[in-house]
Amino acid sequence: MLTHQNLRTLWILLLLHMSARAYKFDILKTHHEPQEGDVRLFGSKNVSEGRVEIYHDGKWGTVCDDNWDMADARVLCRQLNFPGAKSILTGKDYGQAPGPIWLDDINCKGTETHLFTCEFKGWGETDCTHKEDVGVVCETGSINVDINDSTHSLDHSIGLSDFLGQIFDDGNGCDFLIVVQSPTGNKQEDGTPEISEKTICAHKMILSQIPFFNASVGITNITVNLSLPCQPHFTSFIRYIYTRKMDVTLSSALCLHQMASNFGLKQLMEDIGRLFSKILPEDSTFHNQVSFYKYAVETKDLVLEENCVQYMAWNYQNLTRSPAWSGLSVGLLRALLTRSDLVAPDEYFVLQSVERWISEKGDSIDLETQADLLGHIRFPMIPAEKLYVIESSSPLYSTHKTVYRDNMLKAFQFNVLLFSNLTKQKFGKENTDYQPRIYTAEPWSIVLEVSSSETQSGQYNNHYNNYGYNPYSQTRSKSFTTPVHNSLIFKDIVMSWQANIFINRYECSNYGVRCESFPVARLTPQSYISQSEILFRNRVLLVCQGQYVCQIQDFKSNMASVSANATQVLPYPCAGDQFTYQIVVTPEYV
């Protein structure tokens, strides 16, 4: 039982932990080791102004100004113990920002206590450059603030985490027993299942934070059922409840994620879910990716679900050729077909893959579901010359004649009536049938390569001869042409493009552009069009060792930063950072 002294000590520690940031002391500023999710304002002599930076994965990074508003600024300033936000600064130079851009498209309600608890794309997922780093001026509560006499927070809560961990490890005063039971798969002599059992003694006061344990007055124990492989990781999970810290390995991630889901620890579940992105590329059969998706749906982990679907959408062609393709669920296939970031040679390839999937399923898929899946094909995006062969070549045309005819009519209208008054409203953004995916077939894309000799040492400036010529640069520069639009109307109107991959400032300056990180992709039109209804949303695909797409980056002002070590963090890792760069031109009717 807890003694009165132990109980009082534990309560004091918990209260200090929960309110440490509420106490301020008028002392010289103290520096503590940054913790996950910490924020700071950097680059200004004024303590209440600067570039917004957030600490994640052991390094400081910045925040893009896309969609940043005063609600976001208020959350940031309150986290820094300022009473509120005064203004937002964009484009101000606070000096070089060497780290990644951690947050983009952040959306705070304004009531959050920490910036990282707001909605955002995902750590390191951004199409920004450091030119778009956001700055903030926080309210100080006083017009005249003396920097040398400003108020600073004293936060020693990091030591509390270790102290609570020691309390758990020692087991002193524990008053709540957790009995973990796991079937071994064997049977005992009497024929009953053999159970492996483990007992953990914890503190009811700590576990009362987690409703699942029901650690209320009068309850002294609970039995938890776990699979045998997960049983060794349960102690680390309980210790996390004390310390909010944990070491996760790829072998323990699935078990810990499932525990976090079962016990309602959402933040832990989502953070572990992000680790799965590191192992998604390892299975070329796609069985693991499909299994992880199914598991994410069951546990309602939206972060893991998105990571899985995004990876399979980016690598759709490989998926259709994998052993896992025929085993895809209807829900997963539908989730893939709704995405505009699905990468495929063209829309006809997408149609053929869905037809093959339906044919292989046979009578196990009812006609209504088949028609629904076919309805997600963007027929107007199918190349005009391939529309003519659908009726004769499709294995499902006779079964779903109405679906095909209605959608083919849309497609033919798109190819011959694009700008007529009768159809102008049909082709808007709200109708995804007329929105392209990422099509890689000729003439819409080209591939550029950075030689391994240029990247093996991580240096991008040692390959110029005495005349300033880099012998490798020809593989990183290409000219090509595309139609102005994929509608047949523009078949004979050609756009010329120049694509480059720059690997140092010397190359950028030769083209009169400023580059902040390397490598950087550049795609510039060499001719111009008069149609204001057409907008180009071009992208660069990073293909790891010619095997899988690990990053897709939008062009902004003809430039796309593609460095995994600077402003961008790869959603999916690539051993050795050996990439090819696929430049994709995507015209949209707007």
Image: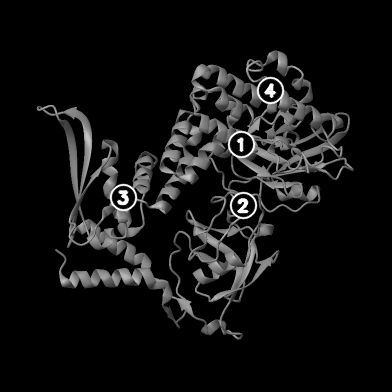
What amino acid is found at the position of numbered circle 4 in the picture?
Thr
What amino acid is found at the position of numbered circle 2 in the picture?
Thr
**Residue identified by numbered label 2:** 567
What amino acid is found at the position of numbered circle 3 in the picture?
Phe
Q: Earlier in the sequence, mark 3 or mark 1?
A: 3
In 3D space, how far apart are the residues under numbered discs 3 and 1 (Cα atoms)?
A: 37 Å
Q: Earlier in the sequence, mark 4 or mark 3?
A: 3
Mark 2 residue crowding within 10 angstroms, few (<14) / some (14–19) / many (20+): many
Tell me whether the residue at label 3 lies in contact with that at label 1, contact meaning CB atoms closer than 8 angstroms.
no
The kind of secondary structure element at disc 4 is helix
| In front: label 3 or label 1 | 1
Instruction: Find the residue positioned furthest to the top.
Output: 392
Q: Earlier in the sequence, mark 1 or mark 4?
A: 1
Quadrant where the N terminus is found in the figure: bottom left
The kind of secondary structure element at disc 1 is loop
Determine which of the numbered discs, if any, sits on residue 338 in the image.
1
In 3D space, how far apart are the residues under numbered discs 2 and 3 (Cα atoms)?
A: 33 Å
What amino acid is found at the position of numbered circle 1 in the picture?
Thr
